[in-house]
Each structure stands twice: as C-alpha cells, then as structure tokens.
Image (spheres, helix red, strand yellow):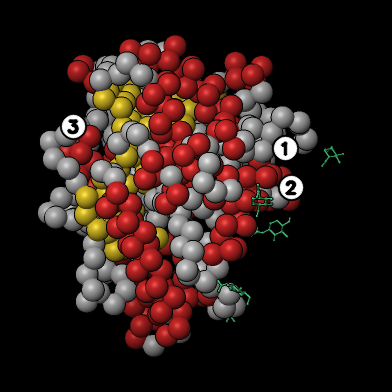
Amino acid sequence: MAINIQTAVDHWLRLLVCLVISMTIHASANLNNVNITILQSAVAKGAVCLDGSPPAYYHAKGFGEGANNWFLELQGGGWCNTEEKCLYRTTQSTGSSKYKEKNITFGQIDSQNQTENPDFYNWNRVYIGYCDCSSYLGNLESNTNITRRGARIFDAIIEDLLAKGMSNAENAILAGDSAGGLGAILHCDRFSQEVLPNAKRVKCLTDSGFFIHAKHLPGADKRAEYFANVTAYHGIHADSLPSSCTSRMNASLCLFPENIIGDMKTPLFLVESAFDEYQLTHNFFSNESTWTNCTSNLEVCTPSQLQTMKDYGIASRQTLQEISDTTSVGMFVHSCYRHGHFYEHAGWDQSTLLAGKTIAQAIGDWFYDRSFFQEIDYDNELPLFRNCSKFTSCSHETNLYA
Ligand SMILES: *[C@@H]1O[C@H](CO)[C@@H](O)[C@H](O)[C@H]1NC(C)=O
Ligand SMILES: *[C@@H]1O[C@H](CO)[C@@H](O)[C@H](O)[C@H]1NC(C)=O
Ligand SMILES: *[C@@H]1O[C@H](CO)[C@@H](O)[C@H](O)[C@H]1NC(C)=O
Ligand SMILES: *[C@@H]1O[C@H](CO)[C@@H](O)[C@H](O)[C@H]1NC(C)=O
Ligand SMILES: *[C@@H]1O[C@H](CO)[C@@H](O)[C@H](O)[C@H]1NC(C)=O
Ligand SMILES: *[C@@H]1O[C@H](CO)[C@@H](O)[C@H](O)[C@H]1NC(C)=O
Ligand SMILES: *[C@@H]1O[C@H](CO)[C@@H](O)[C@H](O)[C@H]1NC(C)=O
Ligand SMILES: *[C@@H]1O[C@H](CO)[C@@H](O)[C@H](O)[C@H]1NC(C)=O
C-alpha cells in the first residue's frame, strides 16, 4: 500500500515538474523556437511521407564560429510494418507532415543556449521530421495508398541542406533518436564519405538507436522477424545497407547495429541505457501476459520478469562491450531505465554522470577529440537499474513511441 501511494505521489510530482519545465521553456522560448520548413520540392522526386505529404524539417541557422558547422538530428518514432499500422500512422505526425508542429522548441543538444549546450549552440541545428516509419530507409517503387520512401526523404532533405550552405560544412554530426538513431547509424558512412567528403570533421551520434538482436535471449527470432517485416514492407534495398554486413548475412539482420558498427569507417558515439525502456517494453523479450503491467510499473513485476530484465541488461552491455573491443566507437551507457535523451529532457543534466561527466560533456569531448569517452556502467553489484532521478522522462508520456 505504501508503495502505491509513493508511486502515485511520484507520478503527480513528475507531472508537476514537467509542467514547470515546459512553462519555463515557453517563457524563454524565443531563442530556441524554430519554425517548420515543408520541403515541397521533394514531392516531384517521390520523396514523400506515408500519406504522400512532403517531408519537413526544422532549421536553426548557425552563427558566429558555428556558421559552417551542421548538426543534423533524425527524429524517431518507431516503425510500422503492416498496412493497418501504417495507415494509422498517416493520421499522425510520424506518417504525415500535415500533423507536424508549425514550430518547436529546441533544447539540450539542439539548444541555442551556450550554458546548456556549450559545444554546439551556435551550429546550424536541423531537426528532421520523421514521417516514413522505416528509419529513413524505405524505397518501395510501386505506389499504393501508403508511400514508403524513407530513403528518398533522407536524400531530398540532404540535397536541400547542401544547397542551403551545408556543402561548405567544416564540422558536421549526423545524429538521431531511437528509430532515427538507427537511421543515423545506417546512413553514417555514406553521409561522411559521399555527402561531406571534404569536411574537416564528420561524426555520427545515436541516441537510444542500439536495438539489439541478442541471439541467445528469448524472442530473438521474433525480433529478427520484426525487422525482416519492416525491410520487406518498406522495400528497403539490400544495397542501401552496408555491404560489409549484407555480404555476411540476410539483409534484414543488417538493421541490427551490432552487425554493422564493427565495420563502420566513421566515428560513432552511442548514448544508451543498458536497460532501454522502449526495447524492454516493445521488442519481444517476454511472452508473459502481465509483461506490460510490469514494464509500466516495476513494483508489480514477478521475480521471473525481473530476471528477464536483468538478463536483458547483461546482454545489452555484453553486446556493447564486444563492439567497444573491436572499434574505437565512443559510448555513454548508463543504467537508468530510460529511452531517449536529446528530446526527452532526460539525463542531459547532472542527474546522469559517468566517469564524472555529463552526456553533454562526453559528446563534446569526443567530437572535438579533447578526450575519448567509452564508459559502460557495469556494476555487478547492481541488481537491476540505477535509481536515477524520477523526473527525467517528462515528455516521454506525450511523445511518439506509443
Ligand atoms: C508557433 O505555432 C503556434 C501554432 O502552431 C502559434 O500559435 C505560435 O504563435 C507560434 N509561435 C511562434 C513563435 O512562431
Ligand atoms: C540558459 O541556460 C541556463 C542553464 O539552464 C539558464 O540558467 C539560463 O537562464 C538560460 N538562458 C537563457 C537566455 O534562456
Ligand atoms: C486506397 O484508398 C482508396 C480510397 O480511400 C480505397 O478505395 C482503396 O481500397 C485503397 N486501396 C488500398 C490498397 O488500400
Ligand atoms: C515466446 O514463446 C515462443 C514459443 O514458446 C518461444 O519460441 C519464444 O522464444 C518466446 N518469446 C519470448 C520473448 O519469450
Ligand atoms: C511478420 O509478418 C507476418 C506476415 O504478415 C506476420 O504473420 C508476423 O506476425 C509478423 N511478425 C512480426 C514479428 O511482426
Ligand atoms: C531473409 O530473411 C527473410 C525473413 O526471415 C526471409 O523471408 C528471406 O527469404 C531471407 N532472404 C534470404 C536471401 O535468405
Ligand atoms: C494489469 O493490471 C491491471 C490493473 O491493475 C489489471 O486489471 C490487469 O488484469 C492486469 N493484466 C494482467 C494481464 O494481469
Ligand atoms: C530512489 O531515490 C529516491 C531519491 O533519492 C529515494 O527517495 C527512493 O527511495 C529511492 N528508491 C529506491 C528503490 O531505492
């Protein structure tokens, strides 16, 4: 009973804090309020959202010493892989630009506030709207009522940004969140080698985009089948995936970052939770009918469900560890129960530290080669998650991952 009261109090406190945060953001919104750009010219190239509407992005211009630096962030929002689910997405902002906000507030790594975002505040910052539900990879030729053209959307927006000055980029980062973070990984080498071959420094950054296959954990076949369905439904071409992977295995398995990161040529940084909330909730790690109850309220988990979560935490860290052993990939892997950091106001501040650094410091140091950063919170004493601030996933409730 005491636990339930505590949970309720936490819930209300969290809502209250979110309200205060959002009011604060709106009060000082001017600097960071960015209007939408609808890319009408993309339609002629067949680069359209699921509903046929043009793609969209939000661009805050760089200034001062950042005028020729570009930070691109691919919005996420899961996938759809059936007619029914994708049809539903055409009525949502993740499937149509018609429902995208006319303006949004940039924060954290997108923020123009130097205190909050010392390394990138004056860069060109572009938030690319997700509306293809294929991690920017789909390219189905034949049109039905649902167009599947994520790869063309990516190309059309890149082309537009090049014309708007990105062709002179000195420093650039291709980043993304969740399904967009997966897109950033899969587009990364092409971005650095073909889009910006002459830039001084190009790197990629993924926020909660490391979706694991974890072959030895229950549900592995189902996870693979899910991505295979996404691949087939959206017409993701094998030749748009890294050949170092497709030459070794079925192309649909090359959507799992663990199968491609080891061969990437471009420096990559991962911001991840070892107990990723979205993956535990959605990606088939348990068959139990009470699983959803457990993942939405850990207090009601059975011992076997908690064991599944522990196994997941061990597997995700092991998978990341194996990658870190073979490449120079940077990583900030904490143990809070969380998914998404850049756009969810989560963990950007002092609430989440590894080796004494915040996520912002770790990324800045890594990008500018001030110091390498590769930390996995690997505490064997840790039973499950770390007890991180409860107030860190505000906008998660209203975000796109439903
Ligand atoms: C942002 O868009 C909303 C409507 O979508 C509008 O009411 C508001 O004035 C806009 N704010 C700015 C700063 O353009
Ligand atoms: C910039 O961020 C800092 C730290 O969050 C805050 O105290 C300050 O008010 C912000 N400045 C502006 C102009 O919003
Ligand atoms: C496409 O939409 C039209 C009009 O809403 C409908 O009649 C048709 O059955 C749809 N086709 C498919 C393949 O869903
Ligand atoms: C669910 O059950 C099936 C059949 O028993 C099994 O093959 C699969 O691995 C299970 N999935 C999970 C996530 O436990
Ligand atoms: C994959 O697609 C098949 C055929 O539509 C469907 O039966 C199956 O449930 C799908 N699997 C997953 C994991 O989405
Ligand atoms: C790749 O995997 C999918 C899904 O399991 C399967 O339908 C397809 O036939 C496989 N392709 C090859 C070339 O084995
Ligand atoms: C999940 O929790 C709700 C509310 O406590 C309960 O009514 C429901 O029966 C639970 N579901 C399962 C499958 O146990
Ligand atoms: C987590 O931390 C909060 C604040 O420090 C504390 O009130 C709470 O009891 C802790 N919860 C657990 C399960 O340790």
Q: Outermost residue, bottom direction?
A: 1
Q: Outermost residue, front direction?
A: 248
Q: Nearer the viewer, mark 3 or mark 1?
A: 3
Q: Nearer the viewer, residue 400 or 366?
A: 366
Q: Name the residue under label 3.
A: 368
State the residue at coordinates (49%, 64%): 215
Tally of marks:
3
Q: Is residue 74 visible?
A: no
Q: Which of 327 and 344 is in front in this view?
A: 327
Q: In the picture provided, is 143 more to the left or to the right than 316?
A: right
Q: Nearer the viewer, mark 2 or mark 3?
A: 3
Q: Does ligand 3 reach within 8 Å of label 1's beta carbon?
A: yes
Q: How crowded is mark 2: few (under 14 residues within 10 Å), some or many (20 or more)?
A: few
Q: Mark 2 points at which residue?
A: 83
Labels 2 and 3: the sequence-earlier one: 2
Q: How far apart are marks 2 and 1 (CA)?
A: 8 Å
The local secondary structure at tag 2 comes to helix
Q: Mark 1 points at which residue?
A: 146
The image quadrant where one finds the C terminus is: bottom right
Q: Nearer the viewer, residue 215 or 287?
A: 215
The image shows residue 9 at horizontal and vertical percentages of: 35, 72
Q: Distance between the residues labelled 3 and 1?
A: 42 Å
The image quadrant where one finds the N terminus is: bottom left
CB under 8 Å between discs 3 and 1: no
Q: Distance between the residues labelled 2 and 3?
A: 44 Å
For residue 390, the mark is: none
